Amino acid sequence: MSKENKPVYLRLRDIIAAAILDGKFAEGAMLPSVRAFAAQQGANPLTVAKAYQLFQDDGLVQVKRGVGLFVSRGAVSRLRKSERQHFLANVWPDVRAQMQRAGIEPAELLENC
């Protein structure tokens, strides 16, 4: 599913997941409130709440009533594993095919890093 076809709540989930994986929100750190994140992203708060609910359902965040949402211990490794599986199953096959069409060898990619 391309980014354009992906529902907004899933795109927001991807943004939050990337921020966690990039270290913007460490394990134990508090995520922005639903309203703050909605304002930052120009999104409806209910849509942000739906994205946050996905993290709760997956055990990646913990709710502290009256305080906020916090990144759970182990969330980074679980997100990384999920991202890796998604990449290998959904992204890599197209990249590999494009490399083959262009005559690019994997070693060339490492040389250019």
Image: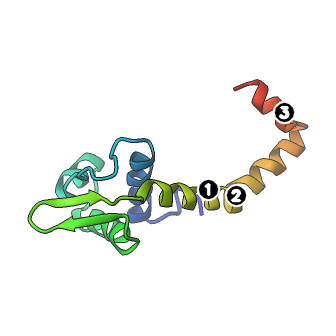
Residue at image position (8%, 65%) is 66
Q: CA distance from mark 3 to mark 2?
A: 18 Å
- The answer to the question of whether label 3 and label 2 lie on touching residues, with beta carbons closer than 8 A, is no
Q: CA distance from mark 2 to mark 1?
A: 6 Å
Give the quarter of the image for residue 43. Answer: bottom left
Residue at image position (43%, 63%) is 10
Seen from the viewer's position, the closer of residues 16 and 85 is 85
- Please give the residue where the numbered disc 2 appears in the rendered image: 88
| Amino acid at the residue labelled 3 | Ala
Residue at image position (25%, 53%) is 31
Q: CA distance from mark 3 to mark 1?
A: 20 Å
Mark 3: few/some/many CA within 10 Å (<14, 14-19, 20+): few
Element assignment for label 1:
helix
Element assignment for label 2:
helix
Give the quarter of the image for residue 14. Answer: bottom left
Q: Earlier in the sequence, mark 3 or mark 1?
A: 1
Q: Earlier in the sequence, mark 3 or mark 2?
A: 2
**Residue 57, position in %: x, y?**
36, 75
Q: Which mark is residue 84?
A: 1
Seen from the viewer's position, the closer of residues 74 and 105 is 74
Element assignment for label 3:
helix
- The answer to the question of whether label 2 and label 1 lie on touching residues, with beta carbons closer than 8 A, is yes
Locate the N terminus by quadrant. bottom right
Q: Which mark is residue 68?
A: none
State the residue lying farthest toward the front.
73
Residue 82 shown left or right of residue 98 in the figure: left
Residue 78 shown left or right of residue 65 in the figure: right
- Please give the residue where the numbered disc 3 appears in the rendered image: 107
Mark 2: few/some/many CA within 10 Å (<14, 14-19, 20+): few
Residue at image position (68%, 61%) is 90
Residue 99 shown left or right of residue 43 in the figure: right
